[in-house]
Amino acid sequence: MKKMFGRVSMHAATALCAWFICGCSEKGIDSQPEGPANFQIDALDAYTFEAELPEQVVFNISSNTPWRIESDQQWCHVTPTMSATSSLVEEITVTVDDNIAFHPRTAVLTISANNIETAKTVSITQESKTDLVVTVPSEPIPAEGATVEIIVRSNKPWEYITEDAFLHEASPASGEGTGEETRVKITVPANTGITREGSFTIRTALTESRNTLTQDGMVLRVDKENEALTFDWQEMSKVIAVDANIPWTVSVDEAYSEWLSAEKGENNALTVSMAKANDQLHAKEGDIVLSPGAGISGVEPVTIHVTQDMAFTWGDVTHETVDGGEKVTFQSGSNAFTFKSTVRQCHVKIEFSEIHLGRTKLRFDFSSSKAGDQTNWRTFLNSDLTQDHGGAPTASKSQCGGSLSWFQHRFDLATEETKKFDASMMGDLQGVELDLKENPDNYNVKVDLHLANKEVSISGTSNKTSTTPDTYDFNFNFMTELTTAGEYVVIKSITVTPYEE
């Protein structure tokens, strides 16, 4: 550490001097006359240290009598602190700890010697740690100009500096650094160009804070949360605000135009619409592009990413998009997918492109849980006549407890028993429609099978055993039983249409 002789920075300006006690002498500090007690010191009356990494102070004592030095603060250290015997010249070193506080501090050194009546005092002051906080508004400055207010809090004198002309007018441009807040007003003129950014610095003798302000110019943007829009599977439109002070247009790529559209409205409103509910077993994704009007340069287009969620949650299957739809491959008897929402009544239509199944049961299930009971409407399609379910060897709808009681039915293609729905017909299955409707006294369910060149239907009515108005919120899922791993179906589309209450 560098030694400093004389002053580090003085509060009280004093000339370098020697202090003589008990008589006058023209001898230097390193010579000692014989006779009475003599004590000389070349220290200044006061020293000032910086807050961090302070340099040390060195002064000298010459004495023919023992002396000692006391510091009244633990952060101020003196070496050595005493002499046991007289000496010609002793070098004294003063060091201080870093000041981590935001206010200055003072210590007093008291230097005394035997047989010397008056003690010498030296004042030690240490600067405070720099406390500089600058608060800047986060919102852009309007293109038409404004007066922006920043807040400066500093415990040291500070000044405002900028090299950007549009941020030049600041008042006040400096402060004494009392530790109190100072509100600085920056007058920003109108911006006729593109968005611009400027910086300014609040600086003290020891530190600085560099800050940035942005001013709008020609603007075309949307809020951050609207840069990506997610629609529920049956949500049809959303209206968002576009922040723009220039003409703009909206476009949708032809790849997405079948299901996605967007229209500019009054007051820069943008309406984003879905053509229909998502009847696919995957989410749809596309982009909307907002572009500046013709002849406007320097403003970037805005892309809004749009997702239309699927109506179902996948089960224990693998799936991939192929020509003809979504290929669903089963691991074993497992749930393929479940409808995300519950309904009281609805129409479900499933179209198949391919079916590659062996000795399998397909199960289309409306399930409802309420007040401790469970009521299901289940439609089974059996590919093996040896299978049986509830007395219906080919297909049935059945009740599983609760207060709804469903009739059991078979799918018959003709009056002959041999022409029931069988394994040979599974490959001809092109679609299934299930219609669930609530009447005042019961539920009606109708099931239609669409096969190659054949149409098969059954319908049934529930018997309510309770006289109180029950509400059943049904969920729908499609699953298989007795499936061999690797068997699959290709689903062309799924449409779930809830009926209005």
Image (cartoon, helix red, strand yellow):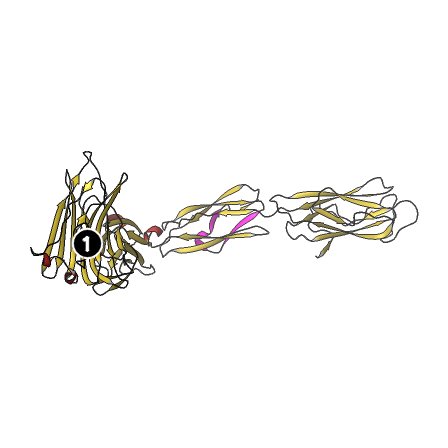
- Residue 461 in picture, x, y percent from top left: 14, 43
Question: Which residue matches tag 1?
Answer: 388
- Residue 35 in picture, x, y percent from top left: 93, 46
Image quarter where the N terminus lies is bottom right
Dot 1 crowding, Cα within 10 Å, few <14, some 14–19, many 20+: some
- Quadrant housing residue 125: top right
Residue 119: say if magenta.
no
Residue 161: say if magenta.
yes
| Residue at (27% x, 64% y) in the render | 486
Figure disc tally: 1
Is residue 346 visible in the rendered structure shown here?
Answer: yes
For this orientation, the residue located farthest to the top is 468
Pick whichever, 52 or 392, lies toward us.
392
Q: Which residues are magenta?
A: 156-173
- Residue 330 in picture, x, y percent from top left: 27, 60
Pick whichever, 342 or 282, lies toward us.
342
Is residue 254 visible in the rendered structure shown here?
Answer: no
Pick whichever, 117 or 253, lies toward us.
253
Would you place residue 163 above or below residue 74 in this image?
below
| Residue at (42% x, 55% y) in the render | 197
Image quarter where the C terminus lies is top left
- Quadrant housing residue 275: bottom left
